[in-house]
Amino acid sequence: MFKLLKESFKRTNKSIILAVPLVIFVLLAELYFSYAKNVISDIAQMLIAIATVIVFISGFMASWFYITKKTLALTDRIFVFENDRGKANTELLLSLLNGIGKLFLPFLGYTCIMVGIYYIMHIAVSVIIIKHLGSINYEWLSFGILLNPLELHDEIINLSKGQELPLSYWMVLMGIGSTIISFVTMLWIPEIVYSKKNVLLCLFNCISKLIITLPKSLLLFIFIEVLLFICAIISVICMDNIYLYFLAILLFYYLFIYIVVLLYTYYEWSFLKED
């Protein structure tokens, strides 16, 4: 496992170019959300916005995860001249559209299925909470507040005790459910990228491979969760200082790329390389 973590760290440092499209995507998403939260006023507009976001995310995932695979292939190559590496990296960025052409439909299916799974989980958890603790009032949650962590935090603090208890249990159950889903689908994206099969078949295959390598996969998942938890703690601590918060965001981008590279490397070593 240590060898895997070390090698993924080296490959991440050689794949920093992946941060460029990632940052651009986040900036475009923030621009769209800033526009949408001031425009959306009814259910129809909300549904259109959700469909737009799903297509937007699917397109980005198809292109970004595609060039991630190609970037990692480049890290194993030896370049005699640094200019050759620069040209290869430029070609990578230009191949973003190739990823959309090859993987858009699988990732559109992936995104829709994940949205459906979380929606069903949301309904199930809400039914459980309402049955045992009373109703959950969602009226204070506007689209704009959901997109603003600071406003969301302030609203939660101002809730009454009667509203706070059901919501707290709801968040705990949603967190547990999200963790289980994240673990079960941990290898789904690498499976889609490397096998390029039907998205449902990829889900079945990734679960099968997860079961076969359960001890190692579980250990890897725990490591990733610890990394994300530490990053979240750092972000909260640095939130009041704009400079430290900026550094925390940079750390998050780096860790995000590292986690993706780690999963790709784990998939390659476990299921693609021959002993």
Image: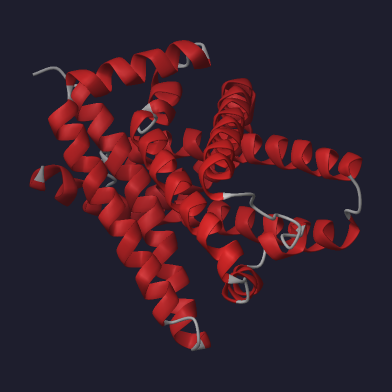
Residue sitting at 39 percent across and 22 percent down? 191
Question: Residue 259: where, in percent of width, then height?
Answer: 33, 48
Q: Nearer the viewer, residue 165 or 158?
A: 165
Q: In this rendering, does residue 101 appear at all?
A: yes
In this view, 162 is above or below 187: below
Q: Is residue 222 rendered to the left or right of residue 3?
A: right
Residue 115, given in percent of the width and then of the height, sits at 61, 33
At 63% from the left and 28% from the top, the residue drawn is: 112
Q: What is the image's colouring?
A: secondary structure
Q: Position of residue 161 (x, y in %)?
A: 56, 69
- Tell me if residue 108 comes above or below residue 252 in the rendering: above
Position of 41 with respect to 124 (left or right) is right
Left or right of 46, for residue 170: left
Figure quadrant of the C terminus:
top left
Q: Quadrant of residue 105?
A: top right
Where is residue 96, by image quadrant? Answer: top right
Q: Position of residue 114 (x, y in %)?
A: 55, 31
249 with respect to 180 (left or right): right
Residue pictured at 33% horizontal, 52% vertical: 258
Near-viewer residue (92 or 237): 237
**Quadrant housing the N terminus:** top left
Q: Residue at x 88, y 53 (%)?
A: 40
Residues 33 and 153: in front is 153
Q: How many marks?
A: 0
- On the image, which quarter does residue 52 sit in? top right
Residue 95 visible in rendering: no
Camera-nearest residue between 26 and 273? 26
